[in-house]
Amino acid sequence: MLREDTDFTPVLTERLRLRRSVLDDAEAIATYRSNPVVSRYQGWDRTDADSIRADLAMMASRAPGEPGWVQFTVEVRETGALIGDVGLSPADEPDVVKIGYTIAPEYQGLGYATEAVNALIAYAFDSLGADVVRAYASALNLPSHRVAERVGMRLVERFEGVHDGHVWQGVRFELRRDER
């Protein structure tokens, strides 16, 4: 059974800090999520700052491990620059956590996504007690696939979905606790 982390403290890596996202992050998050380079592979219906602010307000009272998504802002420790966000949510299956990750285009290709996702996976296993960590992506989002592969996840499913009348192809990556 997943644990709820009611005493969350920021997760630190060599270069990054993953902290709970706050309302003041909405403008920066909206800027990169609205960028066509980012949004073409994402499933968000609303990427404007007001919608993101509303989503963050809804998540604010939720502890990691409780049902529903929780977002973490990814900052560069040395400068405090907000460079992306990652999130997690318990899946509909016991002891499975879903994760998502987005890095602003100007910070992509520098290993930040891999570092942040590695930290998020370790947090899901070690702090929440997950047995499986799962990530979904567009089948066309090859950079996202590479991040999943670099952190040890393996491709376990290809599938087809329909959103607003449009058919799209997706993939599911997973990492099991005993595969770490």
Image: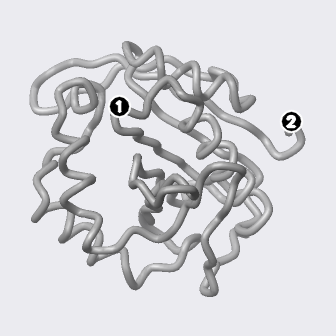
Residue depicted at 56% across the width and 56% down the height: 78
Question: Residue 68 location, x and y as percent?
Answer: 42, 66
Q: Is residue 28 left or right of residue 50?
A: right
Q: What label sits on residue 19 in the rendered view?
A: none
Point out the tag, 2 or 1, that comes first from the N-terminus: 1
Q: Inspect the image, locate mark 1, and give the three-letter code of the amino acid beneath it.
A: Glu
Element marked by disc 2: helix
Instruction: Check disc 2 and report the residue beneath it.
Output: 179
Q: In what quadrant of the picture does the N terminus appear? A: bottom right
Residue nearest the observer in this picture, 130 or 102 = 102
Q: Which residue: 44% across, 28% down?
A: 108
Q: Which residue is mark 1?
A: 106
Q: Nearer the viewer, residue 173 or 101?
A: 101
Percent x, y of residue 99? 53, 47
Q: How many marks are shown on the rendered structure?
A: 2
Q: Residue 176 in the image: x percent, y percent?
A: 78, 41
Spot the residue most to the right.
178
Q: Residue at x 26, y 72 (%)?
A: 24
**Residue at 18%, 33% in the rendered image:** 35
Query: Closer to the camera: disc 2 or disc 1?
Result: 1
Up-down relation of residue 159 to residue 118 (above or below): above
Left or right of 55 in this view: 92? right
Locate residue 92 relative to residue 95 in the image: left or right: left
